[in-house]
Amino acid sequence: MKTFKSDYLKYSKSGYFDLNGIETIKYEEIEKRVNVKISDIEKIVNETKYKTEAAIIRSKKSKSFIIGKDKNRVNIPTKLIYGSEIIHSHPNGTSFSAEDIVETITFGGKQITAFNDEYLYVFKNNVKDDIKFIDTFNSVLSSTEVTLLKKVNNGTITKSQMDFSINHKVWLELSKMIRGFDYEAYSISR
C-alpha cells in the first residue's frame, strides 16, 4: 500500500484513497450497526457492478429502485425523500455530495447511506434548523477548501486526495457543530 505524506489519506488496494482513523466494520455487521439492509447493498451492486450510481429509497409506504446514468449521479425525485431512508452506491468512493446532504435535510429524509466496496457513509438527519445548517455548511466548506488547497500547494497532498476527502472532512466538522447532524464513516472489511 503506497502511503503519502498526508496524515489521513493513502492509496488502498483498489486505488481509492483510504481515510485513516475511521472505524472498520465487518460487512456482516452492517445491518445491525447502521440500519442498512445488506440485501439492498447487494441488489444495487448486482444491478450496476459499480458502473453507475443507483439508489433504493424506502419509506413507510413504498420502496423504489433507481439506476443513475453515470458513476457520479442518481436523480432521486424530491417527493420520495420525505421520511425516507435512502441507500445508494458511490462507485467513485467518496463520501456524500453536498447535494445528497442538502436535499436530505431540506426535503426531510430520515437517513441517507452511501457505499462502495471499501467504505460506508451514513447520515442520520435530525437537523431542526436548516438555515443554520446552510450558513454553517458554507463557512466550513470554505475553510476546509482553503486548508486543503494550502496542503496541495505545499505538496503535502495531491489535488486528487483533496477532491476525495473534502466532503468527508466537512461532514465530520459539521457533525461536531450542528445538533442533529449525525455523520458516520466506516471502512468495510470482508
Image: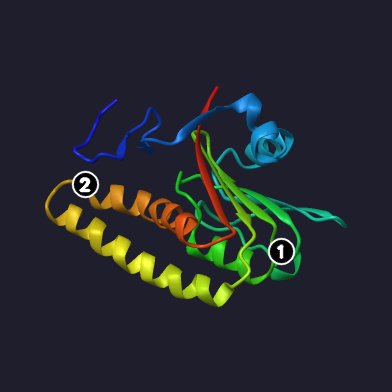
* Earlier residue among tags 2 and 1: 1
Residue that numbered label 2 is attached to: 157
Crowd tier of the residue under label 2, counting other residues whose Cα lies within 10 Å: few below 14, some 14–19, many 20 or above: many
Q: Is residue 131 above or below residue 85?
A: below
Q: Amino acid at mark 2?
A: Ile
| Left or right: 145 as drawn, with respect to 109 | left
Q: Amino acid at mark 1?
A: Ile
Along the viewing direction, whichever of 135 and 57 lies nearer the viewer: 135
Secondary structure, mark 1, is: loop
* Tag of residue 36: none
User: Which quadrant, please, contains the C terminus?
Assistant: top right
Secondary structure, mark 2, is: loop
Q: Is residue 156 above or below residue 15?
A: below
Q: Residue furthest right?
A: 61
What residue do we see at 19% from left, 53% from top? Answer: 151
* Tag of residue 81: 1
Give residue 73's quadrant in the image. Answer: bottom right
